[in-house]
Image: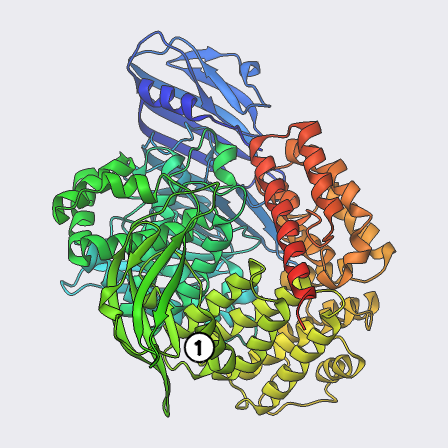
Amino acid sequence: MAGNLTREEARERARLLTVQSYEVELDLTTGAERFGSTTVIRFGCAEPGASTFVDLHGGVVHEVTLNGRALDPASYDAEKGRIPLPDLAADNELKVVADATYSRSGEGLHRFVDPVDQSVYLYTQFETADAHRMFTCFDQPDLKAEHEFTVIAPEDWEVVSNEAPEKVEGRVRRFARTPRISTYITALVAGPYHVVRDEYRRADGSVIPLGVFCRASLAEHLDGDAIVDVTRQGFAFFEEVFGRPYPFNKYDQLFVPEFNAGAMENAGCVTFLEDYVFRSRVTDAAYERRAETILHEMAHMWFGDLVTMRWWDDLWLNESFATFMSVLCQAEATKWKSAWTTFANLEKAWAYRQDQLPSTHPISADIPDIRAVEVNFDGITYAKGASVLKQLVAYVGRDNFLEGVRHYFDRHAWGNTVLTDLLGALEQTSGRELTSWSKEWLETAGVNTMRPAYELDADGNFTSFAVLQEAKPDYPTLRSHRLAIGLYDRTPDGIVRRRRVELDVVGARTEVAELVGDKRPDLILVNDDDLTYTKVRLDDHSLKTLVEGIGDIKDGLPRALCWSAAWDMTRDAEMATRDYVRLVVSGIRGVTDIMVTQTLLRQARTALQQYADPAWRPEGLRLMADALYDLAREAAPGSDFQLAYVQAFTAVASSPEHLAYVRGLLDGTEVLDGLTVDTELRWTLLRRLVVRGEAGQAELDAELKRDPTAAGERHAAAGAAAIPTAEAKAAAWEKITSGTLPNAVFRATIGGFVEPDQADLLLPYVDKYFAEVGRVWKEWSSDTSQTFAEVGYPFLVIDQSTVDRTEAYIAEHNPPSALVRLLSEGRDGVTRALKARAKDATAS
């Protein structure tokens, strides 16, 4: 991994240094392993005579010159990735000539060779601290500087950075100097990329040049016009609500291979996972998620790039703000008007899950070093934080919130901030005191649970009504919530809201006098309209309504909140898994939102695979597969729902007749009107047959011959690891632990290895995992070691022995805290599954 900078080291370096500029020259023509990297840094020092260090990872250092004085290149500490800088002057110029190393892990400057045409593609990924894998730098967010890149590359390549080239001479591109930005949002993308160029024209006639890029072999699949449409909608919305123009000079969006994340907000040069270039038919849910990602990264141009956190403690604010603003933009400026329903189903479910793990932490986290932040890109940092920001907007008022944000940008443009800078601006515009709100919501961990409590008279009217708030003993904070209570009745037009009461809930019990005298409805929904961040429980009468007719709830958001409550009750072993699966099977027809449909089907599948009593699981799989088979045949031909039902059916097909239908769809002997069995669906069908032992390596090889692409290679690797034999598992494990697989193939292989239908085959790998995880954590890069620790954990061996083995390993080896976190999360998943299985075993 790159150097593990600590917060204290960063503070001291920031106290000492002021960085003016970087001039970086990169030679990308020197070979397949290394590239030339020459850096000149100009910086000031507050204490002449002091010493510090500069960062460079994986380099071969040829020359170090500080203020005209040659330093010994052998002083470079390759293990820590640091070059010592002694006896600094008030004004300094440092020149480092080195060869740097291309990455195959998706960190630093990543190099990929397209199997279709053998073309070479490069791109950078620097968050959190990997810029020093490409050039020598002070790699921390609060040492901002201007950056000027010169790149030597083949003449037929597209070469893209934060600014446009201002001079091109043959193989040499000299890029314009950037404004003052952090190292982690600088970028370089190079190769024979296909590009679609366009522009966003403001009302005053000024123009932002736009570019959309992908590999040449994917060009036929790039829907550039659709991407540009969302981009224009985002610019129009954000420039208006933020009250200031886009802060950079152009906006390129590049879909790059083997990317580890969803996207990265490099200033003016945003990189995306190229899975967002859809090779085959996908449902509108995929387009909605792509749009959210596009808008999320665009929001970062202001919040994150223009104004940047001082240190990674405030990562949550970067990501939460971008998440909140992207959903707000989707709901108000694009065709996805139900974006808050998606937020309730996806983001909040992620947040609730993360917040109940033993590794839960306050939103405003304590980040002592880089390794700690790299495991903190989680559901609290993104989704809980965004949920709390949504609540803050309701608390201070939308207009006041946005006015405060505009003041924040005006005061801190091109600088670095801490949380109190934003809260101070919001206090000024809203008149609200936010210190106590921050302590309650940002500085404590855990999620509250709300329940309705009431009494009735003989006629069924409320004689009392209260909201009960609970907290776990380990995280006992009872917070102040602004929420709504909805009363829903059955009508000839479905289940509709009769009354809504909005109030503040404080403490363990809050009386709701307004509802006394009202007739009890069929459904009571606490946190109607999803105003606050809380788990919700349904009273028995409401739960009965849900089970009998959840699909009759006409509005998408309350229906989604009810689904969310049922799923959470299942995960908490308060609802039997089989009851949840039956609820999904009976109610899925009434769901009209494709994103919610696909989410529910994934959750039901997870419930069957991990939470169901093993004795009932075969019956549950048949129940779900039978229902999905019928739904797929009843769905409108060619519709999103038809495709979603077929995909979900395939994932649970287990009986001979169901697997025969999967085989028929693959070989064409079964035809479903309107369904195109395209490249991705073929891999989906084949993967299921492989998992169930109905196909093997020969069929995978044949399919790869049909689809000899990077995506095809990943599918084939995952399929080979999912072959249900001890020999296949052993071969996959050897590849996984070798440390030689490219990052994308590694993720595919380990994903195929941990196949839920093959838990018995994974039993020998419990001890093997614990024998390897310490070595992997120490020797591998951050992303790949984290993937191994998290995905390779034996979470499918749902037995108390797995829990005991984990606790014994932690006690015996005292691993680093970031690794302890991932191990404890895996252990919690097994413990939760054991409790859910025990609950399910008591059901009839």
- All told, the count of numbered labels is 1
In which image quadrant can residue 604 be found? bottom right
Q: Is residue 337 placed above or below 32 in the rendered structure? A: below
Q: Position of residue 295 (x, y in %)?
A: 35, 60
In which image quadrant can residue 314 be found? top left
Residue closest to the eye, 413 or 516: 516
Q: Who's the residue at 50% across and 39% down the image? A: 374
Q: Please indicate whether residue 701 sits to the left or right of residue 184 in the image.
A: right
Q: Please indicate whether residue 140 sits to the left or right of residue 836 in the image.
A: left
Q: Amino acid at mark 1?
A: Asp
Q: Is residue 717 placed above or below 623 in the rendered structure? A: above
Residue 167 in sight from this viewpoint: no
* Label 1: element kind: loop
Q: Who's the residue at 33% across and 54% down the image? A: 509
Q: Who's the residue at 32% across and 42% down the image? A: 440
Q: Residue furthest front?
A: 458
Specify the quadrant that holds the N terminus.
Answer: top right
Residue 573 in sight from this viewpoint: yes
Residue closest to the eye, 231 or 283: 283
Q: Position of residue 822 (x, y in %)?
A: 59, 42
Q: Who's the residue at 82% across and 73% down the image? A: 694
Q: Name the residue carrying label 1.
A: 593
Q: Position of residue 281 (x, y in %)?
A: 54, 77
Specify the quadrant that holds the C terminus.
Answer: bottom right
Q: Is residue 469 placed above or below 667 in the rendered structure? A: above
Colour scheme of the picture: rainbow
